[in-house]
Amino acid sequence: MKIVNLVENTTGESGCAGEHGLCFYVETKQHKILMDTGQTDLFLENARRLEIDLTQVDSVFLSHGHYDHSGGILPFAAVNDSAKIYVTKESFGDYYSTSSGGAPRAIGIAPAIRKLKNLKLVEGTQIIDDELELFSGVGHEIGSPLTNNCLWKMVDGNLIPDDFSHEQCLVIRQDGRIYLFSGCAHHGILNIMARYKALYGGEPDYVFSGFHMMRKEGYSDEDIAFIKDTAKELASSKTRFFTGHCTGTEPYEIMKDILKGQIEYVHCGDSMEI
């Protein structure tokens, strides 16, 4: 399986530009896939630089209803109008952030995405074929990232805490190995791992996901404790983790100190053959 990061917050050695967003390109035996599309059309230029032909993509999966994962969907549809685009029904909600202080700013996805002819609205668990499956319904029992406290949804004219019911995960099976893709793991990566175990038993071999631990400035003692506790719990699994985007470099270094070679930061343009 070939996995290439087309958009991430940081630049790697490939010369690809980065932005606050996330996009993975994945080649399986049966599919060419995009998991998220970043904030803008930047992933199109990065794909050209890496000589990846996005007209051959057959499936696009949106992890959740935020602009920094969905902003490239309409530009992608302009160059590839045949790929199926899988989006949860809840992703078209009215979502806001107060992370910058001041008035809440809209962070939802473009309403025009709903009009795309190949859009597939997903509810719950969906088996696509023998390689691909989607699941949602992740709980908050274990505890979610503290950085969720600035994220909201508008319901009947009132802002309420986002419950992230719009979040979904992609499971890929190939050659006896299981790959789990999330976007930001807003529910918390431990809750996502627990949901996976409840649905399928065991653990995935590989996880590709941001962990939504990044802050613009300063980490509290509570933040550090959450990061360390998460890493210690992940260290008890057999899974190897690839992360970036909203995880943040400082939280990553804290997790790396605990997880060692079990975790790796993925930069924009990085390519992996697994």
Image: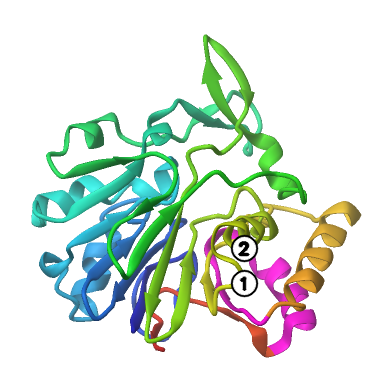
Where is 16 relative to 151, above or below?
below
| Magenta residue span | 238-260
Where is 114 relative to 159, above or below?
below
Say which residue appears at 53% left-offset and 65% top-offset. 209
Q: Quadrant of the N terminus?
A: bottom left
Q: Which residue is mark 1?
A: 202
Q: Quadrant of the C terminus?
A: bottom left
Say which residue appears at 43% left-offset and 51% top-offset. 63
- Which of the 4 quarters of the picture holds residue 34? bottom left
- Please identify the dominant SS of the magenta region: helix
Disc 1 marks a residue whose amino acid type is: Gly
Disc 2 marks a residue whose amino acid type is: Lys
The residue closer to the viewer here, 271 or 274, is 274
Instruction: Residue lying at the far right in this picture: please name it.
Output: 221
Residue 239 in magenta stretch: yes
Residue 227 in magenta stretch: no
Q: Position of residue 241 (x, y in %)?
A: 59, 76
